[in-house]
Amino acid sequence: MVDDAHKHYEAKRKPLDQRQLAAALMSHTRYLASQGGVRAQLAHHNLDGLNLANRNLTEADFTGCSLIGANLSGSNLDRASLYCADLRDANLQSSRLTRADLRGASFAGARLAYAQLDNADMRTATMMYMQWGGDVAVVGGERSKASGNPKGVDFSNCSLKNVSFGSAKLDDANFSGALLQGANFKGARLGKATFKGAVLTGVKDLTVPPGAIAGAVRDVTPEAAAKFDQLKAQLESHQTWVMSAGANGVRAVLDGEDLRPLRQLFVSRTLTGLSARNAVAIGLDFSGSQLQAAKFDGADLRDANFSNADLRGASFRGANLAHACFDGANLNRLKLNNGSEMKPDFSGAQAAEVQFHRATLGDQLAELGLSLPSLRDAGIVEPFFAP
């Protein structure tokens, strides 16, 4: 019955189109400049997928708002209320959220690279909704029954590079799988927060129990850094092998290697048939490279850049591709000498549909084996009270 209550509220949440939203934001801009206008009061509205980028949204009210897939990049949200807001898959890159009320908000899959969240309030919070008949649903953190225990803010798989969490209240927050390169947690409250599988390179002032960072990716080890010359030589030999049609050089097999010490050495290289299964290649730049029939099965390619790369027939089975860029990438079928064709293979890979919007595709993503989760779960019910 909780799901029925969720759906009831979802149907009643007031939708705005882009034109109506623009009018409300223009009035808010005049309000901030003391030129008339009114503060943006958008609580409990549906703004899914709308454009709010590069706006001054200081002190705007988005309480209980649905902003799934919305674009808020570059906007100033200082002291804004996003209490129990749904920001899944939203773009908040380079935004300001200083002292924003983010209690109970959900950020699963959102992009917050270079965002500033100093002194933001991220404590656990819930918002209860009730309809006739007594059906109750809880919004905030993870949806659950009223008697359940809602969790803290969900940053799972978010891009949070260089984000500042100074003095933020992050009790029970979920950073599983998040990209946190260069993030600063000075003075943050992190009781029961989890960072399992997160990328924690260059992170400052993170003090949590060892169990909270199980499986996390840390800074490059001295042993991995010492293999730089060896790995570079393999890349160069592989390129010679490709250019000479196998007469010279040797095909590179980099399976299981930490490739991060190579940094920019993959840019615009001829690496057809490269094997990098189960490699660690977080944040590497493969842009403009020839990677036809390359094997990246099981590799950690979070935040990797494949823009304008030739990936015909490449395999990414089981790879983690969260926040990887495929803008302009060639994902058509590779024609083989025997007349057959090889499709790129993304079976079991972790990615989002938006990552492929600017790629060249010869087949539907589902036909390439990529199973994409829905952006929306069961909905949410008319406000009863908000503790």
Image (cartoon, rainbow, N blue to C red):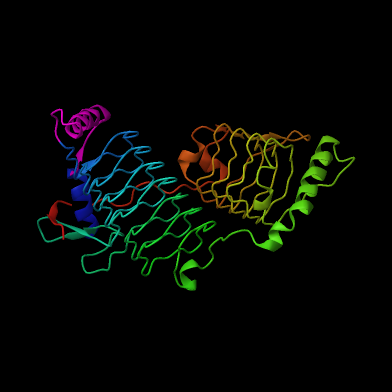
Is residue 28 visible to us here? yes
Residue 335 higher or lower than 191, as above or below: above
What is the tally of numbered marks visible in this picture?
A: 0
Quadrant location, the C terminus: bottom left
Residue 19 placement (x, y as % from top left): 24, 26
- Residue at 66 percent across and 37 percent down: it is 312
Residue 3 higher or lower than 59, as above or below: below
Please say whether residue 30 is one of the residues in the magenta stretch. Answer: yes
Quadrant location, the N terminus: bottom left
- Residue at 14 percent across and 51 percent down: it is 382
Residue 99 higher or lower than 50, as above or below: below
Judged from this view, the residue extending furthest toward the right is: 247
**In this orientation, which residue lies closer to the viewer: 41 or 145?**
41
Please say whether residue 258 is one of the residues in the magenta stretch. Answer: no
Residue 89 higher or lower than 290, as above or below: below
Is residue 256 visible to us here? no
- Residue at 52 percent across and 40 percent down: it is 365
Residue 232 placement (x, y as % from top left): 76, 48
Name which quarter of the figure residue 56 lies in. top left
**Relative to 50, 350 lies left or right:** right
Q: Which residues are magenta?
A: 13-38
**In this orientation, which residue lies closer to the viewer: 325 or 265?**
265
Judged from this view, the residue extending furthest toward the left is: 132
Name which quarter of the figure residue 70 lies in. top left
**Relative to 318, 107 lies left or right:** left
Residue 321 placement (x, y as % from top left): 54, 48
Residue 357 placement (x, y as % from top left): 48, 34
